[in-house]
Amino acid sequence: MTFLKRLERRWQQWLPALLLAAAMLAPAHADIVRLDHIVAIVNDEVITRQELARRYDETVRNLERQNTPLPPRAVLEKQLLERMITELALQQHARSTGIRVDPAQVERALQRIAAQNKLDLPALQAELERQGQSLESLRTTIRNELLIARARERDVDNRLSVSDAEIEGYLQTQAQQGTETEYNFSHILITVPENASPEQIQARRARAEDILAQLARGADFGQLSASYSDAPNALQGGAFGWRPAGKIPELFLSALKPLQPGQLAPLLKSSNGFHILKLNDKHGLDVAMSVNQTHARHILIKTNELTSEADAKNRLLQLKERIDNGAKFEDLARLHSEDASASRGGDLGWLNPGDTVPEFEKAMNALKPGEVSEPIQSPFGWHLIQVLERRTQDVTQERQKLLARQAIRERKGEEAFQDWVRQIRDSAYVELRPID
């Protein structure tokens, strides 16, 4: 799943709570003065007691809205502080490696949030102000999410590769199953640091075994996930929702297959740590084989030390003006595009859904045949896109391979993402201070 889709899924999950959540991030009113202090140092930045308190209040509201029993305050605060440390370390990594978030993208995200709440932006601002809140805290939250998402796409997603042998193996497995099975499951992760000592590993194993024992006795999965899980979805009860078998890590899939809904898998061990799985439900899924394809071409200008974002965008604006005045797109692509497709006049051939990064695909899908886009930014640089034609194509074998590739990439991406998060967290300098 691409990073924008992951973000939009999270925003959709948060929509009922967004206005209330923003209040927890807004500055405290001045009529009550509270002493603040540092509870954690992460490299060269700090997390304060008031920041932790705001995150705690926000989380409590969300858990109550989900009817999830609340863990003890000290347990939940410890869990939240670790999550805040990891998030801050990831944001620092993104900034230190040159990632910047375009303010316009943040504003577009705000517009989507307002629209999903059936409001325009002034109405959203008015509603926030009515509750003593502001848009700025929500902007900060979105900006930080985008920072981490862009770093993930660059450092993890764009480095994934899928071999032809992996695709063939996946398709053979599907053929044997006849119909792919989907699983709805929940997950608790107890991480093990890199280069952990045997004593550390045993301590983490003991914690995981204790959690599994509590679940076997009927403890609430969501509550224990919020209390102890190190997974990104811990505060959503550890829920993964529905996943086709091909998009589930093999370690998880092998444990889920023999389970009946409601059952727990035995404790699992991976390079990330210890995993606890609960199967909520499962059913079969038929794979569709008809897709809408787009024949498109583009001009790419990459950004680097010599070409800034503004320079790349301006160059494309000048090229678009020439195209609008009669210059041929393919001729300019051969002269100016910094993509391998330049020799073909920028021609990308027939594209299936998911073949390009989300920003590119979204802009491409909005174009009519023959139309040229405005400059579009993606992780690869800045693009001009022209759609040549569209068709609906029965591509049974090609589609099977595409779905297989996407499924394998998503499975590998989740595993690689967890490794990446752990490495950045373990490499950060962290100093903890007393919370109270």
Image (tube, rainbow, N blue to C red):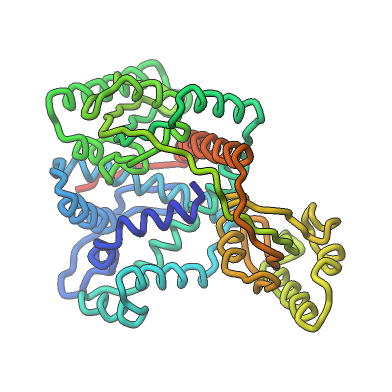
Task: Check the image and report above or below for 24 versus 235.
Answer: below
Q: Give the total of numbered labels.
A: 0
Instruction: Please indicate, yes or no, whether residue 423 appears anywhere in the rendered image.
Output: no
What residue is at 60 percent from the left and 30 percent from the top? 167
Residue 106: x and y in percent read 46, 68
Residue 295: x and y in percent read 69, 59
In which quadrant of the rendered view does residue 197 lie? top left
Near-viewer residue (298 or 351): 351
Judged left or right of residue 289, residue 198 is left
Residue 312: x and y in percent read 72, 68
Judged left or right of residue 168, residue 44 is left
Judged left or right of residue 117, residue 166 is right
Task: Check the image and report above or below for 243 versus 261.
Answer: below
What residue is at 86 percent from the left and 68 percent from the top? 331
Residue 155: x and y in percent read 58, 44
Q: Residue furthest front?
A: 394
Instruction: Please indicate, yes or no, whether residue 161 appears anywhere in the rendered image.
Output: yes
Judged left or right of residue 200, residue 72 is left
Task: Check the image and report above or below for 96 versus 170.
Answer: below
Near-viewer residue (183 or 11): 183
